[in-house]
Amino acid sequence: MTQLPSIIAGRAPFGEGLTPRERFVRTMHYQTVDRLPHMEFGYWESLKDQWAEEGHLPPDLPRNGNGVIDDGAVESWFGCEHRTGVGPHIDAGPLRPIEILGERDGKVVYRDGLGILCEEVQEGIRSIPHFLEFPIKDRQSWASFRDEFLDPSAEWRVQPEAWIDQRADELRHSTNPVGINFGSFIGRIRDWTGFENLAYLSHDDPDLLEEMVDHVTALKLRFLPPLLDKIAFDFAGGWEDIAFNSGPLLSPRVFEQVIMPRMEPVMRLLRQHGIDIIFTDCDGNINRLIPLWLNVGLNCMFPLEVNAQNDIVALRERYGRDLLVLGSFDKFPLLKGKEEILAEFRRLEPIARDGGFIPHVDHRCPGGVPYENYLYYIREKAAFLGMSAEEIAAIPALQARTAGVPA
Protein backbone atom coordinates (compact mmCIF):
# COMPACT_ATOMS: atom_id res chain seq x y z
CA MET A 1 0.00 0.00 0.00
CA THR A 2 1.14 3.54 -0.77
CA GLN A 3 1.77 5.41 2.45
CA LEU A 4 0.77 9.06 2.51
CA PRO A 5 3.09 11.47 4.29
CA SER A 6 1.87 12.35 7.76
CA ILE A 7 0.03 15.67 7.82
CA ILE A 8 1.56 16.16 11.28
CA ALA A 9 5.05 16.48 9.74
CA GLY A 10 6.42 19.91 10.50
CA ARG A 11 3.66 20.86 12.96
CA ALA A 12 5.78 20.72 16.14
CA PRO A 13 3.58 18.03 17.73
CA PHE A 14 2.54 18.43 21.35
CA GLY A 15 4.15 15.16 22.39
CA GLU A 16 3.50 11.46 22.61
CA GLY A 17 0.93 9.57 24.57
CA LEU A 18 -2.12 11.84 24.52
CA THR A 19 -5.36 10.10 25.45
CA PRO A 20 -8.14 10.10 22.82
CA ARG A 21 -9.91 12.68 25.00
CA GLU A 22 -6.93 15.02 25.14
CA ARG A 23 -6.25 14.54 21.43
CA PHE A 24 -9.88 15.34 20.50
CA VAL A 25 -10.05 18.48 22.62
CA ARG A 26 -6.68 19.83 21.48
CA THR A 27 -7.47 19.14 17.81
CA MET A 28 -10.79 20.95 18.01
CA HIS A 29 -9.10 23.95 19.64
CA TYR A 30 -6.47 24.23 16.89
CA GLN A 31 -3.73 23.18 19.30
CA THR A 32 -0.77 20.97 18.49
CA VAL A 33 -1.21 17.22 18.97
CA ASP A 34 0.81 14.04 18.71
CA ARG A 35 -1.46 13.00 15.83
CA LEU A 36 -5.05 13.59 14.70
CA PRO A 37 -7.90 11.52 16.16
CA HIS A 38 -8.91 8.37 14.26
CA MET A 39 -12.73 8.32 14.32
CA GLU A 40 -15.49 7.08 12.00
CA PHE A 41 -19.26 7.39 11.62
CA GLY A 42 -20.41 3.77 11.31
CA TYR A 43 -21.60 1.56 8.47
CA TRP A 44 -24.74 0.52 6.65
CA GLU A 45 -26.19 -2.70 8.05
CA SER A 46 -25.98 -4.34 4.63
CA LEU A 47 -22.28 -3.51 4.35
CA LYS A 48 -21.49 -5.08 7.72
CA ASP A 49 -23.46 -8.16 6.69
CA GLN A 50 -21.58 -8.29 3.38
CA TRP A 51 -18.17 -8.08 5.02
CA ALA A 52 -19.16 -10.66 7.65
CA GLU A 53 -20.43 -13.10 5.00
CA GLU A 54 -17.18 -12.66 3.07
CA GLY A 55 -15.23 -13.58 6.21
CA HIS A 56 -13.59 -10.21 6.71
CA LEU A 57 -15.01 -9.43 10.15
CA PRO A 58 -14.46 -11.49 13.30
CA PRO A 59 -17.43 -13.83 13.82
CA ASP A 60 -17.76 -12.91 17.49
CA LEU A 61 -18.46 -9.19 17.08
CA PRO A 62 -21.39 -8.18 19.31
CA ARG A 63 -24.84 -7.75 17.80
CA ASN A 64 -27.96 -5.99 19.06
CA GLY A 65 -31.33 -7.60 19.72
CA ASN A 66 -32.17 -7.44 16.01
CA GLY A 67 -28.98 -9.26 15.05
CA VAL A 68 -27.27 -6.12 13.69
CA ILE A 69 -23.49 -6.01 14.15
CA ASP A 70 -22.47 -3.22 16.52
CA ASP A 71 -20.96 -0.19 14.73
CA GLY A 72 -18.57 0.52 17.58
CA ALA A 73 -17.17 -2.99 17.43
CA VAL A 74 -16.50 -2.67 13.69
CA GLU A 75 -14.85 0.72 14.26
CA SER A 76 -12.63 -0.88 16.92
CA TRP A 77 -11.68 -3.60 14.41
CA PHE A 78 -10.35 -0.77 12.25
CA GLY A 79 -8.52 0.83 15.18
CA CYS A 80 -10.85 3.78 15.73
CA GLU A 81 -11.14 5.91 18.86
CA HIS A 82 -14.57 6.50 20.34
CA ARG A 83 -16.64 9.24 21.93
CA THR A 84 -18.77 8.65 25.01
CA GLY A 85 -21.31 10.56 27.05
CA VAL A 86 -24.89 10.89 28.20
CA GLY A 87 -28.01 12.82 27.35
CA PRO A 88 -31.25 13.87 29.00
CA HIS A 89 -34.52 12.06 28.32
CA ILE A 90 -35.94 14.68 25.94
CA ASP A 91 -37.03 12.64 22.92
CA ALA A 92 -40.53 11.33 22.23
CA GLY A 93 -41.57 8.38 24.36
CA PRO A 94 -42.39 5.93 25.71
CA LEU A 95 -42.69 4.07 22.43
CA ARG A 96 -45.62 1.83 21.60
CA PRO A 97 -44.95 -1.77 20.51
CA ILE A 98 -44.24 -2.02 16.77
CA GLU A 99 -47.34 -3.22 14.91
CA ILE A 100 -46.72 -5.43 11.86
CA LEU A 101 -49.53 -4.85 9.38
CA GLY A 102 -48.53 -7.11 6.53
CA GLU A 103 -46.02 -8.05 3.85
CA ARG A 104 -46.03 -7.36 0.12
CA ASP A 105 -43.50 -7.68 -2.68
CA GLY A 106 -40.63 -8.52 -0.32
CA LYS A 107 -41.44 -5.58 1.95
CA VAL A 108 -42.92 -5.42 5.41
CA VAL A 109 -45.47 -2.75 6.35
CA TYR A 110 -45.57 -1.74 9.99
CA ARG A 111 -46.48 1.08 12.37
CA ASP A 112 -43.54 2.07 14.51
CA GLY A 113 -43.44 3.06 18.16
CA LEU A 114 -44.52 6.65 17.44
CA GLY A 115 -47.38 5.71 15.11
CA ILE A 116 -45.51 6.31 11.84
CA LEU A 117 -46.62 3.96 9.06
CA CYS A 118 -43.54 2.50 7.34
CA GLU A 119 -42.66 0.15 4.50
CA GLU A 120 -39.24 -1.52 4.51
CA VAL A 121 -37.46 -4.07 2.35
CA GLN A 122 -36.76 -7.35 4.13
CA GLU A 123 -33.61 -8.34 2.25
CA GLY A 124 -30.74 -6.68 0.37
CA ILE A 125 -29.55 -3.13 0.92
CA ARG A 126 -31.47 -1.51 3.77
CA SER A 127 -31.29 2.10 4.78
CA ILE A 128 -34.19 4.45 5.59
CA PRO A 129 -37.74 3.00 5.44
CA HIS A 130 -40.34 4.40 3.06
CA PHE A 131 -42.73 6.44 5.22
CA LEU A 132 -46.41 6.18 4.29
CA GLU A 133 -48.21 8.15 7.01
CA PHE A 134 -47.27 10.43 9.90
CA PRO A 135 -48.97 10.94 13.27
CA ILE A 136 -49.03 14.77 13.29
CA LYS A 137 -51.27 16.30 10.64
CA ASP A 138 -52.81 19.34 12.36
CA ARG A 139 -53.22 21.08 15.69
CA GLN A 140 -55.48 18.38 17.13
CA SER A 141 -53.15 15.51 16.24
CA TRP A 142 -50.20 17.53 17.58
CA ALA A 143 -51.97 17.90 20.92
CA SER A 144 -52.58 14.14 21.08
CA PHE A 145 -48.99 13.33 20.13
CA ARG A 146 -47.59 15.89 22.60
CA ASP A 147 -49.67 14.57 25.49
CA GLU A 148 -48.74 10.93 24.79
CA PHE A 149 -45.07 11.21 23.82
CA LEU A 150 -43.74 14.61 24.96
CA ASP A 151 -45.12 15.02 28.48
CA PRO A 152 -42.52 16.99 30.47
CA SER A 153 -43.94 15.69 33.76
CA ALA A 154 -43.43 12.02 32.86
CA GLU A 155 -41.48 10.33 35.67
CA TRP A 156 -39.22 8.42 33.26
CA ARG A 157 -37.69 11.69 32.06
CA VAL A 158 -36.16 12.46 35.46
CA GLN A 159 -32.67 11.01 35.86
CA PRO A 160 -32.04 10.21 39.53
CA GLU A 161 -29.46 12.38 41.27
CA ALA A 162 -27.55 9.32 42.50
CA TRP A 163 -27.27 8.02 38.93
CA ILE A 164 -26.01 11.40 37.71
CA ASP A 165 -23.41 11.47 40.49
CA GLN A 166 -22.24 7.99 39.54
CA ARG A 167 -21.98 8.88 35.85
CA ALA A 168 -20.15 12.11 36.73
CA ASP A 169 -17.52 10.13 38.61
CA GLU A 170 -17.17 7.57 35.81
CA LEU A 171 -16.92 10.15 33.05
CA ARG A 172 -14.48 12.28 35.02
CA HIS A 173 -11.95 9.48 34.53
CA SER A 174 -12.85 8.70 30.91
CA THR A 175 -9.98 8.67 28.43
CA ASN A 176 -12.50 9.15 25.60
CA PRO A 177 -14.08 12.52 24.73
CA VAL A 178 -17.21 13.06 26.82
CA GLY A 179 -20.28 14.64 25.24
CA ILE A 180 -23.87 15.55 26.01
CA ASN A 181 -26.72 15.10 23.55
CA PHE A 182 -29.09 18.05 23.18
CA GLY A 183 -31.34 16.43 20.59
CA SER A 184 -33.17 18.15 17.76
CA PHE A 185 -34.98 21.45 17.28
CA ILE A 186 -36.75 20.75 13.96
CA GLY A 187 -35.50 17.42 12.58
CA ARG A 188 -37.59 15.31 14.94
CA ILE A 189 -40.63 17.46 14.22
CA ARG A 190 -40.04 16.68 10.55
CA ASP A 191 -40.01 12.98 11.48
CA TRP A 192 -43.37 13.29 13.22
CA THR A 193 -45.10 15.39 10.54
CA GLY A 194 -43.37 14.32 7.35
CA PHE A 195 -41.52 16.81 5.19
CA GLU A 196 -44.45 17.79 2.99
CA ASN A 197 -46.76 18.52 5.91
CA LEU A 198 -43.99 20.41 7.72
CA ALA A 199 -43.47 22.59 4.65
CA TYR A 200 -47.17 23.40 4.55
CA LEU A 201 -47.25 24.04 8.31
CA SER A 202 -44.41 26.56 8.05
CA HIS A 203 -46.58 28.59 5.66
CA ASP A 204 -50.18 27.83 6.64
CA ASP A 205 -49.90 27.61 10.42
CA PRO A 206 -46.61 29.16 11.58
CA ASP A 207 -48.01 29.58 15.09
CA LEU A 208 -48.40 25.81 15.40
CA LEU A 209 -44.87 25.26 14.16
CA GLU A 210 -43.55 27.76 16.72
CA GLU A 211 -45.54 26.00 19.45
CA MET A 212 -43.96 22.67 18.52
CA VAL A 213 -40.42 24.08 18.49
CA ASP A 214 -41.13 25.87 21.79
CA HIS A 215 -42.19 22.59 23.36
CA VAL A 216 -39.12 20.57 22.36
CA THR A 217 -36.90 23.50 23.41
CA ALA A 218 -38.54 23.68 26.83
CA LEU A 219 -37.73 20.00 27.36
CA LYS A 220 -34.04 20.73 26.69
CA LEU A 221 -33.92 23.73 29.03
CA ARG A 222 -35.57 21.70 31.77
CA PHE A 223 -33.61 18.45 31.56
CA LEU A 224 -30.13 19.51 30.40
CA PRO A 225 -29.13 21.45 33.56
CA PRO A 226 -29.11 18.51 36.02
CA LEU A 227 -26.46 16.83 33.83
CA LEU A 228 -24.55 20.00 32.98
CA ASP A 229 -24.31 21.02 36.64
CA LYS A 230 -22.49 17.83 37.68
CA ILE A 231 -20.69 16.37 34.65
CA ALA A 232 -17.70 17.89 32.86
CA PHE A 233 -18.36 17.66 29.11
CA ASP A 234 -15.90 18.17 26.27
CA PHE A 235 -18.51 18.62 23.54
CA ALA A 236 -22.23 18.69 22.84
CA GLY A 237 -23.98 17.09 19.88
CA GLY A 238 -27.41 17.22 18.31
CA TRP A 239 -29.21 15.92 15.24
CA GLU A 240 -31.29 17.58 12.51
CA ASP A 241 -31.07 16.05 8.98
CA ILE A 242 -33.07 19.00 7.71
CA ALA A 243 -31.39 19.59 4.32
CA PHE A 244 -31.23 17.84 0.96
CA ASN A 245 -28.67 18.08 -1.83
CA SER A 246 -29.45 21.66 -2.89
CA GLY A 247 -30.29 23.31 0.41
CA PRO A 248 -32.48 23.30 3.54
CA LEU A 249 -35.85 21.55 3.48
CA LEU A 250 -37.45 24.73 4.81
CA SER A 251 -36.85 28.35 3.91
CA PRO A 252 -33.83 29.89 5.67
CA ARG A 253 -36.32 32.52 6.80
CA VAL A 254 -38.08 29.85 8.90
CA PHE A 255 -34.76 28.89 10.47
CA GLU A 256 -33.85 32.51 11.14
CA GLN A 257 -37.23 33.53 12.59
CA VAL A 258 -38.46 30.32 14.26
CA ILE A 259 -35.59 27.90 14.92
CA MET A 260 -32.59 30.08 15.78
CA PRO A 261 -34.30 32.14 18.53
CA ARG A 262 -35.12 28.83 20.27
CA MET A 263 -31.65 27.40 19.70
CA GLU A 264 -29.84 30.42 21.09
CA PRO A 265 -30.70 29.93 24.81
CA VAL A 266 -29.77 26.25 24.61
CA MET A 267 -26.41 27.05 22.99
CA ARG A 268 -25.85 29.75 25.61
CA LEU A 269 -26.61 27.26 28.38
CA LEU A 270 -24.05 24.81 26.98
CA ARG A 271 -21.38 27.49 26.69
CA GLN A 272 -22.08 28.73 30.22
CA HIS A 273 -21.04 25.24 31.31
CA GLY A 274 -17.74 25.42 29.43
CA ILE A 275 -18.76 23.56 26.27
CA ASP A 276 -17.35 25.26 23.17
CA ILE A 277 -17.35 22.31 20.75
CA ILE A 278 -20.99 22.06 19.66
CA PHE A 279 -22.10 20.13 16.59
CA THR A 280 -25.24 18.91 14.97
CA ASP A 281 -25.60 15.95 12.61
CA CYS A 282 -27.18 17.32 9.45
CA ASP A 283 -26.98 15.65 6.05
CA GLY A 284 -27.40 17.51 2.78
CA ASN A 285 -26.36 20.98 1.66
CA ILE A 286 -26.03 23.09 4.79
CA ASN A 287 -24.25 26.11 3.29
CA ARG A 288 -27.16 28.46 3.98
CA LEU A 289 -27.55 27.15 7.55
CA ILE A 290 -23.91 27.40 8.64
CA PRO A 291 -23.88 31.19 9.23
CA LEU A 292 -27.15 30.94 11.18
CA TRP A 293 -25.77 28.16 13.37
CA LEU A 294 -22.47 29.96 13.94
CA ASN A 295 -24.35 33.07 14.95
CA VAL A 296 -26.12 31.28 17.84
CA GLY A 297 -23.04 29.35 18.97
CA LEU A 298 -23.24 26.00 17.16
CA ASN A 299 -19.78 25.86 15.62
CA CYS A 300 -19.06 22.32 14.41
CA MET A 301 -20.48 20.78 11.21
CA PHE A 302 -21.01 17.02 10.96
CA PRO A 303 -20.70 15.00 8.69
CA LEU A 304 -20.42 17.69 5.93
CA GLU A 305 -21.42 15.57 2.93
CA VAL A 306 -19.27 16.35 -0.10
CA ASN A 307 -21.77 15.23 -2.74
CA ALA A 308 -24.26 17.77 -1.34
CA GLN A 309 -21.98 20.64 -2.42
CA ASN A 310 -20.35 21.23 0.97
CA ASP A 311 -16.73 22.23 0.25
CA ILE A 312 -14.66 22.25 3.42
CA VAL A 313 -11.83 24.18 1.74
CA ALA A 314 -14.15 26.99 0.64
CA LEU A 315 -15.94 27.00 4.00
CA ARG A 316 -12.70 27.33 5.94
CA GLU A 317 -11.68 30.23 3.69
CA ARG A 318 -14.99 31.93 4.43
CA TYR A 319 -15.37 31.26 8.17
CA GLY A 320 -11.79 30.68 9.26
CA ARG A 321 -11.19 29.07 12.60
CA ASP A 322 -14.71 29.82 13.80
CA LEU A 323 -15.66 26.63 11.91
CA LEU A 324 -15.01 23.12 13.23
CA VAL A 325 -15.70 20.00 11.14
CA LEU A 326 -16.17 16.27 11.71
CA GLY A 327 -16.27 14.14 8.54
CA SER A 328 -15.97 15.57 5.01
CA PHE A 329 -14.18 12.58 3.39
CA ASP A 330 -16.30 11.86 0.30
CA LYS A 331 -17.79 8.37 0.61
CA PHE A 332 -17.96 7.71 -3.13
CA PRO A 333 -14.21 7.23 -3.77
CA LEU A 334 -14.47 4.21 -1.45
CA LEU A 335 -16.62 2.57 -4.14
CA LYS A 336 -14.03 3.33 -6.83
CA GLY A 337 -10.41 2.61 -6.01
CA LYS A 338 -7.04 3.56 -4.57
CA GLU A 339 -6.27 6.59 -6.74
CA GLU A 340 -9.62 8.19 -5.93
CA ILE A 341 -9.09 7.51 -2.21
CA LEU A 342 -5.63 9.10 -2.27
CA ALA A 343 -6.93 12.11 -4.19
CA GLU A 344 -9.54 12.71 -1.52
CA PHE A 345 -6.92 12.68 1.22
CA ARG A 346 -4.85 15.18 -0.76
CA ARG A 347 -7.88 17.47 -1.07
CA LEU A 348 -8.30 17.48 2.70
CA GLU A 349 -4.63 17.87 3.61
CA PRO A 350 -4.51 21.69 3.99
CA ILE A 351 -7.51 21.73 6.34
CA ALA A 352 -6.28 18.76 8.37
CA ARG A 353 -2.89 20.42 8.74
CA ASP A 354 -4.53 23.60 10.05
CA GLY A 355 -6.58 21.84 12.76
CA GLY A 356 -10.15 22.08 14.00
CA PHE A 357 -10.99 19.12 11.77
CA ILE A 358 -11.29 15.36 12.28
CA PRO A 359 -11.52 13.63 8.88
CA HIS A 360 -13.73 10.60 8.41
CA VAL A 361 -16.29 9.31 5.90
CA ASP A 362 -18.98 11.94 5.33
CA HIS A 363 -21.78 9.62 6.44
CA ARG A 364 -22.12 5.98 7.37
CA CYS A 365 -19.97 3.93 5.02
CA PRO A 366 -22.45 2.84 2.29
CA GLY A 367 -23.40 -0.58 1.01
CA GLY A 368 -21.26 -2.11 -1.71
CA VAL A 369 -17.88 -0.72 -0.61
CA PRO A 370 -15.30 -3.48 -1.26
CA TYR A 371 -13.49 -4.51 1.89
CA GLU A 372 -10.13 -4.16 0.14
CA ASN A 373 -10.90 -0.54 -0.70
CA TYR A 374 -11.92 0.23 2.87
CA LEU A 375 -8.87 -1.49 4.34
CA TYR A 376 -6.71 0.59 2.00
CA TYR A 377 -8.56 3.71 3.16
CA ILE A 378 -7.89 2.83 6.81
CA ARG A 379 -4.19 2.15 6.15
CA GLU A 380 -3.68 5.41 4.27
CA LYS A 381 -5.81 7.37 6.70
CA ALA A 382 -3.71 6.14 9.63
CA ALA A 383 -0.58 7.49 7.95
CA PHE A 384 -2.39 10.70 7.00
CA LEU A 385 -3.38 11.26 10.64
CA GLY A 386 0.22 10.93 11.75
CA MET A 387 -0.06 7.55 13.48
CA SER A 388 3.27 5.87 14.17
CA ALA A 389 4.30 2.67 12.43
CA GLU A 390 3.65 0.83 15.71
CA GLU A 391 0.15 2.30 16.04
CA ILE A 392 -0.68 1.38 12.45
CA ALA A 393 0.61 -2.16 12.89
CA ALA A 394 -1.57 -2.55 15.99
CA ILE A 395 -4.86 -1.92 14.11
CA PRO A 396 -6.64 -5.31 14.39
CA ALA A 397 -7.80 -5.44 10.76
CA LEU A 398 -4.27 -4.73 9.53
CA GLN A 399 -2.79 -7.19 12.01
CA ALA A 400 -5.08 -9.89 10.65
CA ARG A 401 -4.05 -9.13 7.08
CA THR A 402 -0.34 -9.13 8.00
CA ALA A 403 -0.76 -12.47 9.79
CA GLY A 404 -2.37 -13.98 6.70
CA VAL A 405 -5.78 -14.32 8.38
CA PRO A 406 -8.72 -13.69 5.98
CA ALA A 407 -9.71 -10.10 6.63
Image (spheres, grey):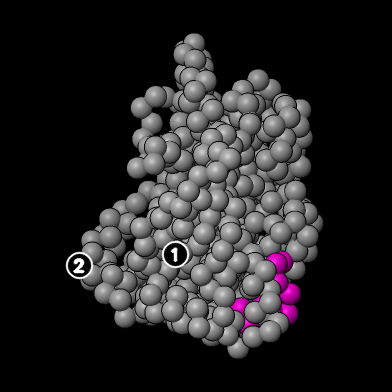
The magenta region covers 248-259
Q: Main secondary structure of the magenta part?
A: helix
Measuring 65% from the left and 56% from the top, which residue is drawn there? 283
- Residue 114 is tagged as 1
**CA neighbours of label 2 inside 10 A, class few (<14), some (14 to 19), many (20+):** few
Pick whichever, 138 or 302, lies toward us: 138
Measuring 68% from the left and 77% from the top, which residue is drawn there? 200
For residue 370, above or below residue 384: above
- Residue 226: image location, x then y, percent: 32, 74
- Residue 116: image location, x then y, percent: 50, 62
Pick whichever, 231 or 123, lies toward us: 123
Q: Is residue 63 magenta?
A: no
Quadrant of the image containing the N terminus = top right
Measuring 58% from the left and 59% from the top, which residue is drawn there? 132
Circle 1 — which element? loop
Q: Amino acid at mark 2?
A: Ala
Q: Amino acid at mark 1?
A: Leu
For residue 343, above or below residue 88: above
Residue 47 visible somewhere in the drawing: yes
Q: Which residue is mark 2?
A: 162
